[in-house]
Image (spheres, grey):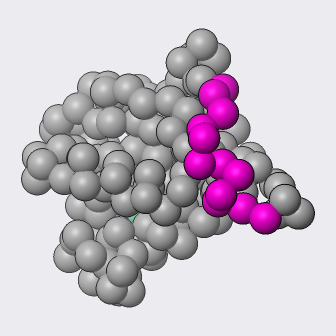
C-alpha cells in the first residue's frame, strides 16, 4: 500500500456530453485528492506519444482524432493505491463490458468513446503526469478529510 498519484483525462466525449463535473465529483466523493487539474487542447504529436502502444492498431489515427475533437480536462489524483483504484473505478476499456457502477459502465456504450483515460501502472503514471503537468501545476496540500479516509496503517 502506498500513496500514489495518477493521471486521469476527461475525454472530449465527456466534455461534449457535459459530464465533466459529474465525473470529477465521482472521484472526489470516492476520496481521491485533486492535486492538479487543467483544461487542454491535445495535439496529434502529444497523442502519438500518449498512445504509442496503439501505433500498430488500425484505429490509432481514429482514436487520436477523437481525442482532438474538443479540449480535455487533465486531473492528477492522489490516494492509497490510486493507480489501480482509479482503473477499477473506471472499468474495462469497452463501456459495453463495464460493470454497472463503474464510470464506463454507468456512462458509456462504446469501446472508443469511453469517458476517461487513467494511467495503468506506476511507471506509466509517472511518465504521463510529466507529459501533462509541469511540476508547479501539481499541488501538495493536506485535505482535511484525509484522517477520515484511511486507517493509519494503510499508507
Ligand atoms: P485504456 O484506455 O482502457 O487503458 P488502451 O490503452 O488499450 O485502453 O486504449 C486507449 C484508448 O484507445 C481506449 O481508451 C479507447 O478509447 C481506444 N481503444 C482501445 N482499443 C480500442 C478498440 N478495439 N476499438 C476502439 N477504440 C479502442
Q: Residue furthest top?
A: 136
- Give the left or right position of residue 2, taking residue 52 as reference: right
In the image, residue 14 sits, relative to residue 111, either above or below, namely above
Residue at left offset 44%, top offset 52%: 28
- Residue 125 point in image, percent of width and height: 65, 44
Q: Nearer the viewer, residue 40 or 142?
A: 142
Is residue 65 something one can see in this rendering?
A: no
State the extent of the magenta-drawn residues as a range: 140-151
- Give the left or right position of residue 152, taking residue 94 as reference: right
Q: Nearer the viewer, residue 21 or 14?
A: 21
In the image, residue 72 sits, relative to residue 119, either above or below, namely above
Is residue 2 something one can see in this rendering?
A: yes
Residue at left offset 27%, top offset 76%: 106
Q: How many marks?
A: 0
| Ligand 1 image-quadrant field | bottom left
Q: Is residue 142 magenta?
A: yes
Residue at left offset 25%, top offset 55%: 22
* Residue 137: quadrant of the picture: top right
Q: Quadrant of the C terminus?
A: bottom right
Q: Quadrant of the N terminus?
A: bottom right
Q: Is residue 111 magenta?
A: no
In the image, residue 50 sits, relative to residue 82, either above or below, namely above
The dominant secondary structure in magenta is: loop
- Residue 54 point in image, percent of width and height: 47, 55
- Residue 37 point in image, percent of width and height: 42, 30
Q: Nearer the viewer, residue 58 or 39?
A: 39
Residue at left offset 41%, top offset 36%: 74
* Residue 84: quadrant of the picture: bottom right
- Residue 46 point in image, percent of width and height: 43, 29
- Give the left or right position of residue 32, taking residue 95 as reference: right
Amino acid at each position: 500500500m502506498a500513496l500514489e498519484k495518477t493521471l486521469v483525462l476527461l475525454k472530449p466525449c465527456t466534455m461534449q456530453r457535459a459530464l465533466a463535473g459529474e465525473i470529477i465529483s465521482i472521484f472526489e466523493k470516492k476520496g481521491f485528492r485533486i492535486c492538479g487539474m487543467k483544461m487542454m487542447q491535445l495535439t496529434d504529436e502529444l497523442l502519438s506519444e500518449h498512445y504509442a502502444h496503439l501505433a500498430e492498431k488500425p484505429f490509432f489515427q481514429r482514436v487520436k482524432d477523437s481525442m482532438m475533437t474538443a479540449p480535455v480536462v487533465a486531473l492528477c489524483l492522489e490516494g492509497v493505491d490510486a493507480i489501480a483504484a482509479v482503473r477499477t473505478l473506471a472499468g474495462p476499456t469497452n463501456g459495453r463490458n463495464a460493470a454497472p457502477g463503474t464510470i464506463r459502465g454507468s456512462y458509456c456504450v462504446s469501446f472508443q468513446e469511453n469517458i476517461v483515460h487513467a494511467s495503468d501502472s506506476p511507471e506509466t503514471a509517472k511518465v504521463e503526469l510529466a507529459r501533462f503537468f509541469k511540476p508547479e501545476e501539481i499541488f501538495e496540500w493536506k485535505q482535511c478529510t484525509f484522517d477520515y479516509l484511511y486507517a493509519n496503517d494503510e499508507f
